[in-house]
Amino acid sequence: MSKTDTDSRSDTQTESQPLVDHTVEGETSEEIRDEWTNYDFDGEAKLSVSELNVYYGDDHALKDIDMEIPEQSVTALIGPSGCGKSTYLRCLNRMNDRIKAARIEGNVEFEGKNIYDADANLVELRKRIGMVFQSPNPFPKSIRDNISYGPRKHGDIDTGLLARVLGRDDGEREERLVERSLKQAALWDEVNDRLGDNALGLSGGQQQRLCIARCLATDPEVILMDEPASALDPIATSKIEDLIEELSEEYTVVVVTHNMQQAQRISDQTAVFLTGGELVEYDDTEKIFSDPESQRVEDYITGKFG
Amino acid sequence: MSQRTGISNVFDERLGDSTAFTAVAAVGALSLLATFVLFVVESDLASVALVVFVAAAAYGWLFHQAETAWGLSVLTTLVGIVVLGLILVFLFLEAEKAFETAGLSLLLRSAVPVWSPSQGIYGLQVAIHGTIVTTVIATLIAGPLGVAGALFISEIAPERVGELVKPAIEMLAGIPSIVYGFIGFAILNRYLFYELQLNTQGSLFLAGGVIGLMALPTVVSVAEDAITSVPESMKSGSLALGATDWQTMKGITLPAAFSGVSAAIILGIGRAVGETMAATVILGNVAGEFPNPIFDVFASTATLTSLIASQYGDAAETQLSALFVAGVVLFVIVMFLSLVSQLIERRMRRQLEGDS
Amino acid sequence: MSNASERGVHRDHSPLLPTVSAGVVGLSFLTFVLAWLVLFPILTPSTQLVGGVTFYDVFGLAMLLCGVALVGSGVASRTGYVPATPSATAGVTTGVVLGVLGFVVTGLFVSQTLGIDGPMGLGWFLAAFVGGAAVFVATVAPREDVGSTVPIGAFALLAGLVVLLGVIGDSWTWNPSGLAATFSGDMAVPVVALVVSLLTAWAGAKAYEGFGARGRQLGAYMFVNLNAALMLFVLFVLIAFIVYRGLPGVLRGAAVGLGTGPEVAFGLHLPFDVPFVTNSYGLRNDVNGVLPAVFGTIWLVVGAVVLAVPTGVGAAVFLTEYSREGRFTQVVEIATNGLWSTPSIVYGLFGLAFLVPRFGNSASLLAGQLVLGFMLLPLVVITTRESIKAVPDSYRDASAALGVNQWQTIRSVVLPAALPGTVTGIILGVGRIAGETAPILLVTSSSMSPFPASRFVPRVLSGFQFTAQPPFVTNTELLQASSALPYQLYALITAGVGAGAGSDADIDPWSTALVLLIVVLTFYAVGIASRSYFRRRLQE
């Protein structure tokens, strides 16, 4: 998927997938002040984004985003649908490379280097910045194979006839890894007696936790979650939310949600995107929900629009 | 159709109309049946019955279009089944004589020659062997290359390149088999004959290669459909774990599309088994003796199809009937492959629907 | 095996390995192209180039160079001299490919060069098996950077030396026992070079990306892209070759200008004349042509379309609009797919058994039309069904909500919306049957001469006659045998009018093939173009 082609067929792409919608009512034109998005926090920034712009053809989907994401915490991205929050999330592990019409400019620094540099190694990048999708997407394989898929592809685990013959079978290591990942994702107790079963037989909530476990198995540092509970029922949702809070002790979690209560419950800091692909305000979650600086953000979180 | 405007006409009251229509419909159906029966028994009267049917259909179309359209659509649906049935019946009817004369030696004869019409010997083993050899060679070419081509179009090529390659491969399918055969006959046959110092012009090897090229587009387009139908979310899931595009294709996309891809290869095999003209023109169509040794792919024997096409013309009664036996064998093989690929495809559809 | 130092998101910079590997890939590619040119003797292998160097030497040298470079790359990566990210093993696929190669090479060496057959021919087999297994282990046991380069490099070195030292050269021949073929050096050297160049390019591509998952991806993509390029190339070469050989014959005596063409009506002449297409065969013709075959094909296609299109569309309408999914539709579906995959020669046999006896016991145009119609039928059903299914249900609901009955809805909403897809499918199907030879051969053209005279041009429209007795209507033209373009080509081939052997008055098979190709590919081009046009319009 070469990037040279990103501007081809742009019109049809944007029209068939309205990724950005400028027509939400209630939008008032209000200056965005830099200090609203300059979030001060203690500790290190895991990812720092500067002057990030995304275009779908002529559509300017994300405008001049500057944002520092602190490590080992939960950052929530909220905003009305079509505000570009999912697009933004997918910029952080370069999953937007898959969308041929998208053009991405700017910097996303991870470990002090821009991941959009020409010499970036996508394999290593995505291994260390994992992602969980909106609807659960387990592979049509056994639960065990789902977990060990990533490590196998990276050559960290090697099983099978050849490995056994050559005496470097990692079967035991695989079992340990599967158990650890499933336990971290709070799924072990439910599936430990049927690791060989097809993952598609699990319930929706279990499938999503399996996807989280699958992501943890590659030993990531950052986990990106794109509305991970939106396709689930309330009980499964609360399990995922508990899990996210636990994960933030060890990992940097960035989660997109359209559910403001959820953002309030699980996140340490919240970034509000509003229509037009702008980051309007970014601060401690408490501050955002109790005393936002921007009038538009206040309108949005009090339900006046969006 | 009569014009109605009143609210009371929500319930249809055209009783009188419908009896007249039923009568016409009955006449139409009976006359069509009569046409068919009369045609089968070789009577000139078939055309009279056909005229009656056309008249009944025309009347129905003018005065009861909706019902007639329904009736005609039912009849047209039956045509496919009837044709398949007729093919089956007439192939077997014509093959019967050879079976009566030669019995199972048609397929199981061990003495040489196995096929010698002048001696009244009709065994199909050499032709079957030829069909197997050419089909295996063709599948070895069309299978892997076809799947690779499908992967290229659906997963690897940039959109614009894919849009160019896809029609080109369809064009490759469009080139008539006799043209492939002619190039094989006029150019490649001679080339291999001189370069490899063969004893005969034409070889199973070359026929298989050309047939493989011809079966390739079938495999590409069916496999491409199967690969495209794997949901994007599964592929994204793999890529987000840091797998490369190629690992995703090998680890996720191809296994998920496995049934569809195997159906594509089976369809390709079906095409290869039934391919006639290229084999007829390239091969020597001698079906008397097996190549010696049996794996000599540079021998110039015959396939089932080329045997029929090359010998039907001057075939006496029993010989012609034996050629029909070859047709039966072909038909059975291809029907079997078609059924298997349909079963597999149905399974794939169910699986993927269950997934999403 | 990842360790801390390799966990960088950015790659290490060192141009050495990529540069050398790119060189290997480039050299392999050149060898590959050159090998094809020598194989299809566009170039003669023993030609003396500068300083007495032959193509043999070029191949040998290229393989030698690639081999040295690959072994060097592997060792340099293993010793850490150049940065790379190899996996623990080269993998089973590479192992099996090279194992098979090792099996073949050892087997050939033992049985052919040493002449050892062993008891029951098992001797060479055992040796080959041991050789293959050894190569397999040598490939999969070491780390990937060694396993995927050194065995291939060693093989390239060996092949290069064998060719350079003239072990396999100009006067070398090999007649394998059991095959009717004899391989000469002219054949063997380019074939060996082909195989070696593919392998070295593969290894080079892996090394270029520093091995590992990305290296394997590049290696695989190289093959997949090469495969696609070759398919395009084959298509291009086929068409170009037929145009090259056939065009002079088609254009013989051709003229462009007002009034040069044959008369159409009322003294009006076509502004061009292509006698090869507008003439029949006659002893007094300057240029003999294939007019009867052209008309035969036209009438066959017209007849097939008249039969298959209404029938197929009707069946598709019934299956999608009237009936529910159930046992009956399933049976129809199986029958349709069965008809679609039935070989054309079987259709021919069916026509011979069923239709020919009922049309005066002789080959006839009508029988051909029916058989081709039956062949076209499943294709029409399948494509029409697809395009009717693609019509959104909301259209039907909207029409039904206005009180329009089902048939009216089908006629005025569903069918028009499904028209583009249906027409495209029919055009492509027509292209297919227009080129069909086997059924025509059996039921329509069996007795036709490869040089049909003008009385064999079917004049179907003027052939209808009305009689007082049943069957009341007869058309002798429809009941007569007729030629057709694909049959014409077949007849010329079997008549021994080979490539370029004929005199000027003969009908050139290449020109016939070109006319046939133009007819068929025009249908395809129109069909494909209209499909992409309608698709684009749907997307807008």
Image (cartoon, coloured by chain):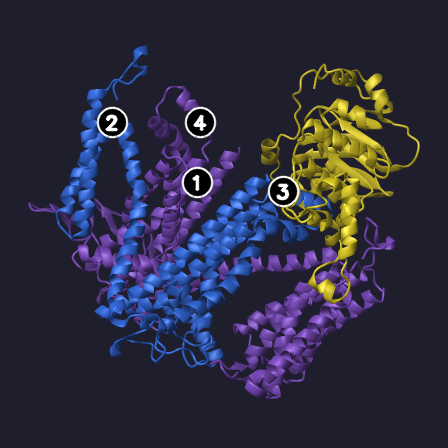
Chain colours: A yellow, B blue, C purple
Residue at figure coordinates x 82%, y 50% from the top left: C10
Between residue C505 and residue A141, name the one nearer to us. Answer: A141
Looking at the rendered image, the disc whose residue lies closer to the viewer, 3 or 2, is 3
Q: Which residue is mark 1?
A: C386
Q: Which residue is mark 4?
A: C395
- The correct choice, above or below, for B305 with respect to C257 in the image is below
User: What is the total number of numbered labels drawn onto the structure image?
Assistant: 4
Between residue B283 and residue C190, name the one nearer to us. Answer: B283
Is disc 3 in contact with disc 4, using a CB cutoff of under 8 Å?
no
Amino acid type at circle 2 is His
Label 1 element class = helix
Q: Measured from the top left, where is residue A163 in percent x and y?
A: 73, 63
Looking at the rendered image, the disc whose residue lies closer to the viewer, 1 or 3, is 3
Q: From where the camera sits, is residue B316 visible?
A: yes
Q: Label 1 is found on which chain of the structure?
A: C
Label 2 element class = loop
Label 3, label 2: how far apart the Cα atoms are = 52 Å
Residue at figure coordinates x 76%, y 45% from the top left: A126
| Residue B64 badge | 2
Label 1, label 3: how far apart the Cα atoms are = 29 Å
Badge 1 and badge 2 in a common chain: no
Quarter of the view holding residue B240: top right
Label 2, label 4: how far apart the Cα atoms are = 24 Å
| Residue A200 badge | 3
